[in-house]
Image (cartoon, helix red, strand yellow):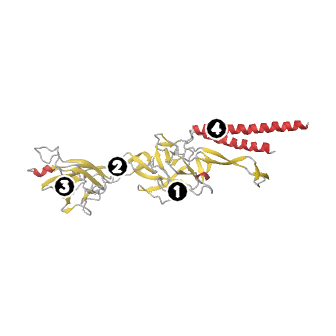
Amino acid sequence: MASFSIPLTGLQADSTALNTIANDLANMSTTAFKAQTTNFSDLFYQQIGSTGSGDPIQVGAGTQVANTETDFAAGTPNSTGVSSNVALQGSGFFVVDQGSSQYLTRDGEFQTDASGNLVTSNGYSVMGYPAANGVVNTSAPLTAISIPMDQVQPPQATTSMSMDLNLDATANTASTPASYSPSITAYDSLGNPQTVTVTFTSAGNNTWDYSAQLPASAYAAGGAPAPNTGTITFDSNGNLTDLNGNPVGTGNSSVTLGLSTAATGANPLADGAGPLSITWNLLGSNGQPTISQVAASSSSSSTPGSGSSLTSYTQNGYETGQYQSFSVGSDGTVTVSYSNGNNNVVVGQVALANVTNDQGLQLLGNGNYLTTRASGAAAIGTSGSAGLGTMEDGALEASNVNISDEFSNLIVAQRAFEANAKSVTTFDTVTQDAINMVH
């Protein structure tokens, strides 16, 4: 009888809604869990007649579950302080690999395995783009992100340096030449530190002679090579204008310092390292000179030119380094820090993916999703591109379940279930009354 079948469809649909709500509440603390909503639709209708005007008289057959809709809105990122944890904010999914299949997930509770691979809590590899010599190749196929935890970073000889300094302009009034000798620490091919000293000697008329060399003890038998010498000139405002007699600018903004050229043997340095040649850049990244000549307030009135000072310097060499830690940037770039102070070595970039219809994804549990024909194939990209979200290191995305909404939905679903149950008992009473009339 339809009197029984109709409320039974309601009971079945309401049971599904209650199960969905219960699952949402059970996963309130599940990392990156996405709340679901059960939606109903009516069943077919039977036409039992028509009105005098020809309008059909139709009776419904009940209800059914139309779909369970997933809310893919991002949850709040909660800081954990764990570098391997990554919270995804905005659209997209992480790509993880089981070995035979790839899945999508929002759960960024990653960790490293014994081999240094970045993996999920259930052991799936986190996929991304590889990097070679610190440069990510986003055109390469996805590969498992690997952290070089057991590797020693080999040393790198210094090949470039820059000094941010001011030469005291009061040296122009000195009766005898004033000199200033700042030093920087560079590294040779074996990773040993070498002290590079550049001596500036005032020559009058806003001109200074320079001479660069390593200490004599740094060289092998045979003695040190002749110092690298030259001249720099400033204008009346203290701006660097000429280098070795030519205007400073494109094509004349640096000096190559051959600091270990010796006639004896292939290893001119005492420690056996290879030749040390350094490009001294006199212009900064903004194209402006890093050396100026203005009067220094710290200059002694009795010793003109004594106020010259070195503010800072940069050089690109480093000694051997031990792995210390890694971090994931907002764009997914994975960088490693070493004990030698080399803290931004790029080893890969975490990839993100998106689908045309996220409601078509198949939920697999453990926070994983599988693409289907309904969802469309996953489009792979990088954070911030093609509408993909960004990442937050040291944090996890919280569940987006709203307890207030769930309790409201729970009350509605409970009342609907009770109403359908009441319909069944009412129809049972009516049926019993009809049977009693026969007797």
Q: Secondary structure at mark 1?
A: strand
Q: For the residues marked 3 and 2, what is the alpha-carbon distance in whole angstroms? A: 28 Å
Q: Do labels 3 and 4 touch, CB within 8 Å?
A: no
Binning the other alpha carbons within 10 Å of mark 3 as few (below 14), some (14 to 19) or many (20 upward) gives many
- Regarding residue 26, the answer to whether it shows in the image is no
For disc 4, the marked residue is: 410
Drawn side of residue 25 relative to residue 252, left or right: right
Which numbered disc, 3 or 4, marks the residue closer to the eye?
A: 4
Query: Looking at the rendering, which quadrant does residue 428 occupy?
Result: top right
> Which residue is at a point 62% across and 56% down the rendered structure image?
374
Q: Position of residue 430 (x, y in %)?
A: 82, 38
Which numbered disc, 1 or 2, marks the residue closer to the eye?
A: 1
The three-letter amino acid code for the residue at tag 1 is: Ile
- In this rendering, the answer to whether 220 lies above or below 398 is below
The three-letter amino acid code for the residue at tag 4 is: Leu
The three-letter amino acid code for the residue at tag 3 is: Tyr
